[in-house]
Image (cartoon, grey):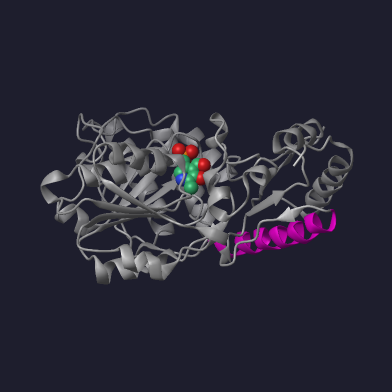
């Protein structure tokens, strides 16, 4: 059975460039902290990969504490949030501003901070848009941190974070700005200069790199002002911001994937936009509802609400036919909670339980969309409906 893989927001296949780099990396077994030739060889390869990933973010020769390699997007988000808030001596307030639709790696980290006494303000993301006027009204001198995701992993809403971050610079200039760009990296056009965030999280396995590797951009101003502290403490790797012997295979794979993705950015984006728009119109034709954000839409995500069919039932039906989709974000499928992103978007609890996510990469085709739609149509006609 041929597989149709439409779950690229959960993770992607490894591209040939990353695969080749990782095979070469196996020979780079020297510890990058060692001063002999094997150590220096590993160090050189890490430096090269940091430049490759950095270039895709608009950085030229980033230092190790400017682009910190971590183990996953979750760790990047945790380091960004806990690392800045616990830089206590630099803290001058108590308020943290975020949205009601963040990934659990942000949401649960902020819930922990809430328990520790911080005030967390969650902005509505109704119809995929953050209300800029309300955002401005809650920004004040007491605000220490603003954490907004770039692309919602379940609805594909692209929030207007550039505009919102500019407001922070004007109304709460001492607040630290974090952007979870895990779903936006190499999908949406941005770089560190245009985004104006102090901290940006990205992850390797979402962009055809390997799992177990990600990065956090940290602005030089934040480092200079000592507004971030490490939470993984040890030998002082990554200029002290993330201790632990570096994952060279992962780092070299991520570097190669980022370089290839950046070189083909416009081509890949266009392919995904065409697939997204084609899939959207065909899904509506066969009786599904597509959750289309009022603002900008990510090129790779389509959120589809089925007519009274549980997402899990449809997921299993499609999977039996070789088609891989998701019934919500991969991470939230570990818990039985109704998706906060869908509820935040304005989808009812009943409909959220009937919503599947299709997510593309540049290797998908319109023929695959046709095969998916044919299976979806059969599924809608034959599967048992749940009562409203
Ligand atoms: N942030 C967003 C928006 C995500 O979609 C994900 C993963 O789905 C993460 C963070 C976590 O990334 P990782 O799987 O690398 O921990």
The quadrant the C terminus occupies is top right
**Residue 170 located within the stretch drawn in magenta:** no
**Residue 282 located within the stretch drawn in magenta:** yes
Image vertical order of residue 36 relative to residue 120, above or below: above
Name the residue located 45 percent from the left edge and 29 percent from the top edge: 26
Name the residue located 80 percent from the left edge and 36 percent from the top edge: 2
User: Which of 31 and 57 lies nearest the eye of the viewer?
Assistant: 57
363 sits to left or right of 374: left
User: Which of 234 and 254 lies nearest the eye of the viewer?
Assistant: 234
Residue 124 spot, x, y in % from top left: 46, 57
Residue 221 spot, x, y in % from top left: 20, 59
Count of all numbered marks drawn on residues in the image: 0
Q: Is residue 167 visible?
A: yes
Q: Which residues are magenta?
A: 263-286
Name the residue located 84 percent from the left edge and 58 percent from the top edge: 285
Residue 97 spot, x, y in % from top left: 33, 55
Q: Is residue 253 visible?
A: no
16 sits to left or right of 376: left
Q: Residue furthest left?
A: 89
Secondary structure, magenta segment, majority class: helix
């Amino acid at each position: 059975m041929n597989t149709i893989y439409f779950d690229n927001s959960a993770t992607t296949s490894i591209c040939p460039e990353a695969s080749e780099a990782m095979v070469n990396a196996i020979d780079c077994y020297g510890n990058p902290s060692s001063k002999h030739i094997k150590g220096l060889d590993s160090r050189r390869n890490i430096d090269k990969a940091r430049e490759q990933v950095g270039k895709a973010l608009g950085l030229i020769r980033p230092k190790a504490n400017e682009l910190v390699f971590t183990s996953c997007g979750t760790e990047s988000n945790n380091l960004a949030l806990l690392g800045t808030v616990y830089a206590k001596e630099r803290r001058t307030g108590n308020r943290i501003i975020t949205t009601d639709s963040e990934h659990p790696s942000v949401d649960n980290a902020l819930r922990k901070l809430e328990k520790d006494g911080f005030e967390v303000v969650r902005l509505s993301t109704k119809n995929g848009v953050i209300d800029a006027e309300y955002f401005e009204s809650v920004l004040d001198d007491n605000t220490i941190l603003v954490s907004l995701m770039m692309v919602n992993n379940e609805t594909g809403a692209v929030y207007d974070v550039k505009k919102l971050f500019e407001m922070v610079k004007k109304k709460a200039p001492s607040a630290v700005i974090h952007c979870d760009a895990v779903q936006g990296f190499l999908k949406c056009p941005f770089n560190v200069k245009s985004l104006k965030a102090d901290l940006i999280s990205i992850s390797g396995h979402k962009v055809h790199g390997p799992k177990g590797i990600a990065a956090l951009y940290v602005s030089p101003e934040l480092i200079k002002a000592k507004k971030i502290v490490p939470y993984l403490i040890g030998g002082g790797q990554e200029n002290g911001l993330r201790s632990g012997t570096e994952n060279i295979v992962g780092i070299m794979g991520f570097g190669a994937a980022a370089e290839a993705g950046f070189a083909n950015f416009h081509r890949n984006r266009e392919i995904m936009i065409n697939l997204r728009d084609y899939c959207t119109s065909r899904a509506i034709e066969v009786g599904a509802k597509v959750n289309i954000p009022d603002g900008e839409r990510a090129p790779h995500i389509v959120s589809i609400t089925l007519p009274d069919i549980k997402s899990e039932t449809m997921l299993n039906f499609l999977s039996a036919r070789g088609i891989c989709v998701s019934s919500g974000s991969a991470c939230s499928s570990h818990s039985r909670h109704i998706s906060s992103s869908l509820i935040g978007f304005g989808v009812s609890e009943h409909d959220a339980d009937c919503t599947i996510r299709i997510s593309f990469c540049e290797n998908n085709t319109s023929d695959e969309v046709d095969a998916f739609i044919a299976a979806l149509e059969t599924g809608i006609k034959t599967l048992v409906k749940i009562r409203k």
